[in-house]
Image: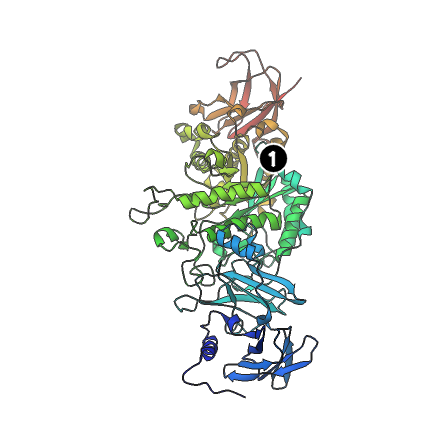
Amino acid sequence: MSVELKTSLSPGQRDIEALASGTHGDAFAVLGLHGGFGKKLTLRVFAPEADAVEAISTTGETIGALVRIHPAGFFAAPLPGERKFPYRLRYRNGTALWEDDDPYRFPPILPDIDLELIAEGNHLKIWEALGAHPRAIDGVDGVLFAVWAPNARRVSVVGDFNGWNGMRHPMRLRHRAGVWELFLPGVKRGAKYKFEILGSGGTLQPFKADPFAFYQERPPATASIVHGPCDRSAHLDSWKETRRTANALDAPITIYEMHLGSWMRSPDGEFLTYDEIGDRLIPYIKDLGFTHVEFMPVSEFPFDGSWGYQPLGLYAPTSRFGSPDDFARFIRRLHEAGISVYVDWVAAHFPTDPHGLGRFDGSALYEHKDPRRGFHQDWNTLIYNYGRREVANFLTGNALYWFDHFDIDGFRADAVASMLYLDYSRKEGEWLPNEYGGNENLAAIAFLRRLNELAYGAFPGIATVAEESTAWPGVSRPTYLGGLGFGYKWNMGWMHDTLSYISKEPIHRKYHHEKLTFGLIYAFSENFVLPLSHDEVVHGKGSLLSKMPGDRWQKFANLRAYYGFMWGHPGKKLLFMGCEFAQDREWNHDRALDWFHLEDDKHRGVQSLIRDLNAVYRSSPALYKKDNEPAGFEWVEANDGDNSVLAFLRRCDNAPPVLVVCNFTPVVRYDYRVWVPKLGRWRERLNTDAEIYGGSGVGNQGGVDAEQVRWHERPYSISLTLPPLATLIFEYQES
């Protein structure tokens, strides 16, 4: 039966009307079993899908039938007794009959300590509190949903389990932290869900994906998926000690950067799965000798064309290639093969997609309210409010989550420069200075320092890498010395200068010789990675091969010589996929690499060179042990710009020195003399002009002997034949 509502509503009726209209902010004050402690019990249920509702015991006996008190589907009835007890509900709609547990009979669930830490911004495992977590409460299986939305008037869980009806399951607000929670019995892993949020101004937001979802639908679909934590047995326990040495400053590090969606595809052009990528990738990079692989962002992102650099599901590995468990297994397989794993991590900005973080609870919650600090004009994205402790906790927690949950070995923080400067890419009047009148983003600086302190403190041996494109001091210096605390920094200056040099015709290079030598002025001011990344082979820049001048032979020779120079130069190495075999065209995220190039001798020769460069590099401690110390480098010939030749030594303790000599002209130079520190044999370890790489085969017959011929005020020297457009690597051979 239905009870007619009066015009003048009683307080109880007002609550019912507010629930019916979706404007009530405290559903638990109305729904569920009320009374007890000497007061009569009353049960209230909202079930718009039912014609009739009755309360039953946990063993199935009928306790009492409820009466419809509002046409929208509210039922209520007094129940016997004065003490609350467990119960279930039985629903009827026509001939259909079903039973379920009432979500509104459960007490508050999140512990006070979690709420306190969330409010403070100090919850180091925040993903264990917020999000969707399958669990059992009082013997009832279901999912605990929790979301931070402090300015919302109402938050509801919607999903395929309730017809996406926001009136069906409003949540409980835990006031201290602005967290809403609800335990939904019967919901299982694999259920799709979002949050419906009524803002403080009464505006209903678009359905929002869960910021802490472990799993999301494959784009363009946008729902979150109940998953729960991955099985930690996927971690390789013995890897922790390996990680410490593999990421060390004195370790050989050569990184293969790749985009999972376009490295290789199925014959019909579809994405490979994480398992299928692993089957192909692991033996490939093992064969080439790379020590690390770096994945462009794998956090879920809505737009393929962003390559992952505009993510919205920071806690969810993209479902384009499989599940979170598949990704965890992929990481373990890489570790079992001895390959370290970095992921690109984006905390600089996020996109404005309606299901995302923008105006999440009807207010500028994750982003800064003022667009002069909260909107990125270059990318039309929103900028995190790093000064808000809960937002900083969301981001630091996310970085820690990837280390803890997936056992990654490091991350590269994207677009750090845009975080550090308030006037980044802004004109006069388009930015707000800090409290001291400067352009430094003090909140972002504090965030990055704390992030690195927490990451290195919790996970010894990991590496954090900054893509920072300015001369900001101390990016890779400890925070106690005033640095930002990163382990490494991309050397963007080296990349720009050397690519500018190598792209010039050899006849003009003598006028730009300083582009090769200038980098050594600051080479030891940071712990540098030399990056030839995806950014250098897109947006009309062409491939690395296409940047090289000359005919086809010279293009390949220039590129090989450049790679030799890079591998000999101080700094860890990073090379984007496809560059290892000199792909002709620039990278396109919508198609696989041009693997057919490996049918061509010239392309195959470049691939062979990379394999041998990695082998020489890893077997010669002088090339990496003192990458970050001036003592590990010495110029042998820095001033022969007229001939576009340079030579330098790499050194370390208790290992033979290595001599690197580069000739960046197509002219063979005979009897070219350079000084060396020791008498004896200097073995030619690598010649980029060797015939096996597609070169002309000019060289030094495997090595040369030093002579007591004074050169550049040094007592010993060697006479070399310098091949055209080539780099030679010699190693001193102890007699």
Is residue 551 visible in this depiction of the protein? yes
Q: Is residue 141 above or below residue 564?
A: below
Toward the front, the furthest residue is: 38
Query: Which residue position holds label 1?
Result: 614
- Is residue 215 or residue 107 the one in the foreground? 107
Vertical placement of residue 374 versus 649, above or below? below
Q: Residue at x 62, y 37 (%)?
A: 244
| Label 1 element class | helix
Packing grade of label 1 (10 A; few <14, some 14-19, many >=20) is many
Residue 579 at least partly seen: no
Q: Nearer the viewer, residue 522 or 64?
A: 64
Can you give x and y, in whole percent of width and height, for residue 299 in the image? Answer: 54, 54
Q: Position of residue 443 (x, y in %)?
A: 42, 46
Quadrant containing the C terminus in the rendered view: top right
Q: Position of residue 51 (x, y in %)?
A: 57, 84
Residue 694 screen position, x and y as percent: 58, 35
Q: Compare residues 486 and 353 and report the one nearer the observer.
A: 486
- Say if 468 sits above or below 372 in the image: above
- Say which quarter of the image contains residue 681: top right
Q: Amino acid at mark 1?
A: Asn
